[in-house]
Image (cartoon, rainbow, N blue to C red):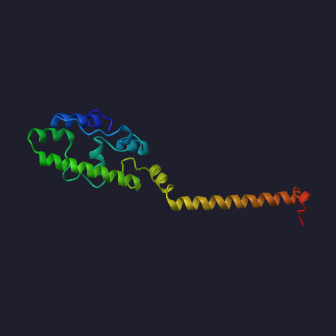
Amino acid sequence: MINIHYGFETLAHRYYVLTGRNAPSIDIDNRINIAGILFGIYGENYVGTPHMQKLMEVNGGIRRDFVLGKDEVELFRQKEYARLHASTVCKVKFFSDVVELTLDKKLKTTRSTALVKVERSVDGVVAKGIGLAASAYAIIDLGGKAVGYAIRHGWLAFIGITAS
């Protein structure tokens, strides 16, 4: 939400123009930049532009009430407020779905390469459990071999442990 065309400040300005009142303020620490988070997870080219439309296309298709921002201007001029409202609700619902899919690691992107899939697979509970078990086995195995080597070479004779 840092883009000049649809950031928080732009929305606040539109609210003022439409209502003549100042928009409710959201403290900057409480703002969530969904696009920035997606860039951080998937890289800048995670999907084509326009981002919202392309993200919809790869995650089930364009929503029924979705209208591109540039086309919303014409709807406003034609006083088609119900369609504008439906588009806004559609976008808010889509943002909610994107956040949920991202948290569940199920968001589809055009960058869903093997690397992203590998990153997702090793982030699961099962993968972490297997990694922990393998690490524990390696430590125990290495420790046993180290003790056996020390005994065979008489390094533990000073405490009474010798090879038979």
* Quarter of the figure with residue 47: top left
**Residue nearest the viewer, comparing 78 with 30:** 30
Please give the name of the residue rendered at 26% of the width and 37% of the height, measured from the top-left corner.
6
Please give the name of the residue rendered at 36% of the width and 49% of the height, measured from the top-left corner.
109
Tell me: 158 left or right of 101: right
- Number of labels in the image equals 0
Tell me: 90 left or right of 105: left
Please give the name of the residue rendered at 31% of the width and 52% of the height, measured from the top-left corner.
96
**Residue nearest the viewer, comparing 105 with 32:** 32
Residue 114 in percent (x, y) is at 45, 51
Residue 21 in percent (x, y) is at 19, 35
The answer, for residue 7, to whether it is visible in the render is no
The answer, for residue 59, to whether it is visible in the render is yes
Please give the name of the residue rendered at 36% of the width and 37% of the height, measured from the top-left corner.
28
Image quarter hosting the N terminus: top left
Tell me: 136 left or right of 83: right
Residue 82 in percent (x, y) is at 12, 48
Image quarter hosting the C terminus: bottom right
In the rendered image, the residue lying farthest to the left is 78
Residue 93 in percent (x, y) is at 27, 52
**Residue nearest the viewer, comparing 12 with 128:** 12
In the rendered image, the residue lying farthest to the bottom is 164
Above or below, 8 against 85 in this view is above
Tell me: 39 left or right of 91: right
